[in-house]
Image (cartoon, rainbow, N blue to C red):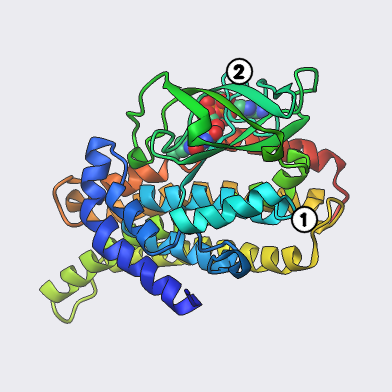
Amino acid sequence: MHTAATLMESARLVAREYAAPHADAVDKDARFPQEAVDALKQEKLLSAYVPRELGGAGASLSELVEICDILGRQCAATAMIFAMHQIQVITIVKHALDNPWYRDYLQRLVQHQYLIASVTSEVGVGGEMRRSRCAVEQDGDHFRLIKDATTISYGAQADDLLVTARRTPEAAGSDQVLILVSKADYTLEQKGNWDTMGMRGTCSPPFLMTATGSLNQIIAQPFGDMSAQTVVPVSHLLWGGCWSGCAIAATNKARAFVRGQARANPGTVPPTALRLAELVSMLQSLRSSVQACLTEYEQLAAADDAASGPLSSIGYSLKMNNLKIDATQALPQIVTKALSICGILGYKNDSKFSMSRHLRDAHSAALMVGNDRILATNANLLLVLKDD
Ligand SMILES: Cc1cc2nc3c(=O)[nH]c(=O)nc-3n(C[C@H](O)[C@H](O)[C@H](O)COP(=O)(O)OP(=O)(O)OC[C@H]3O[C@@H](n4cnc5c(N)ncnc54)[C@H](O)[C@@H]3O)c2cc1C
């Protein structure tokens, strides 16, 4: 059974031995990081957050964010796959533990290390997570669901999918439920490619999903409540861990570059050292804001599981949205600064200082739920929020 120390040891092992050696090939070929994900399964890290009573390691969110950071330093796609899977596990643990079907599912997840993908984005709705077009069609004690999804990361490799949908065909777009569908009960028809600038290893093409299942698989709590209390804050924090890892990778290369310059001219401080000082300060701000929001979330979540609690307040939503906006604006700036320090060696694809993968991965952050969409939400919230 994992302790906090062995979790990190396992994460470092996976990052060093399985993610790092294949990161460039995963990026070049836009292929799934199979070696790293197999190793995460081998180390039982996919069930890290599952409570101990159900066989998991009972890890905290902080520990998962640290694992994302460790993985993200070597392969941002592997880190993001780990993060997206954990968002699904955390949502189930926090909102469906009173449902016997889900308790049994989590025990099976521990045993088989199932990988869960997320299906929220939809044709006609885009990245607006709080609205669905597809709807649950009930047939006795079973349901049928068809979703035209614009993007499902590792859809082809996942064992199960956690899907948003309207509660009934008559329900409003925002009256959503969350449903876990199992591989044996769904088909995915791939409708396009995933040949992107960055995050190529997440393998996230569009799919038409057709699923059936038992009504027990529909989580009782409205998705809107789960989204505010868990899905949004936890996503931004776990992604924050991945983005920190990516920023650290770029910064470490810049540090090595400047140290090399200093060694070449003993007794002098290279001009790039000034830029490095600025870069390290930018990195510190990014990491500090993720850490501050993480500490606050863990405190609030421990005391609050009610839909009317602080996690569901307008002020808290704004804060977590601001974390996402600020971190995703900072990340490409950090990598770009690291590139300017390393100069041509950072620009080359075949140099040990290459920034290419980090910079391309960094630009996905602002799109993973579009920043303008988040700013538009904040603009609406600010109209009704009382002054500090
Ligand atoms: C690496 C990666 C992995 C992903 N994995 C998954 C996944 O596993 N599952 C999943 O469901 N989705 C996934 N997504 C999709 C993602 O979460 C977003 O849904 C998707 O990127 C949004 O598509 P879009 O850029 O067309 O934005 P949309 O949200 O469709 O918006 C289109 C454009 O309009 C702008 N816009 C939209 N609304 C407003 C507004 N109100 N005001 C101003 N501007 C607005 C946006 O900024 C954007 O420029 C992934 C995306 C990435 C990059």
Residue located at (80% from left, 17% from top): 170
* Disc 1 residue type (three-letter): Leu
User: Does label 1 or label 2 sit earlier along the sequence?
Assistant: 2
Farthest residue in the left direction? 264
Residue 136 relative to residue 170: left or right: left
Farthest residue in the bottom direction? 267
* Disc 2 residue type (three-letter): Gly
Q: Quadrant of the C terminus?
A: bottom right
The foreground one among 241 and 114 is 114
Classify the position of ligand 1 by quadrant: top left, top right, bottom left or bottom right: top right
Residue 205 seen in render:
yes
| Mark 2 crowdedness (10 Å alpha carbons): few <14, some 14-19, many ≥20 | few
Residue located at (53% from left, 53% from top): 108
Q: Relative to 45, does residue 366 appear above or below in the rendering?
A: above
Residue located at (24% from left, 63% from top): 17
Q: Which residue is mark 2?
A: 124
Residue 388 relative to residue 181: left or right: right
Distance between the Cα atoms at labels 1 and 2? 29 Å
Q: Secondary structure at mark 2?
A: loop
The foreground one among 312 and 37 is 37
Q: Which residue is mark 1?
A: 311
Residue 194 relative to residue 305: left or right: left
x and y percentages locating residue 310 in the rendered image: 81, 58
Q: Secondary structure at mark 1?
A: helix
x and y percentages locating residue 287 in the rendered image: 51, 64
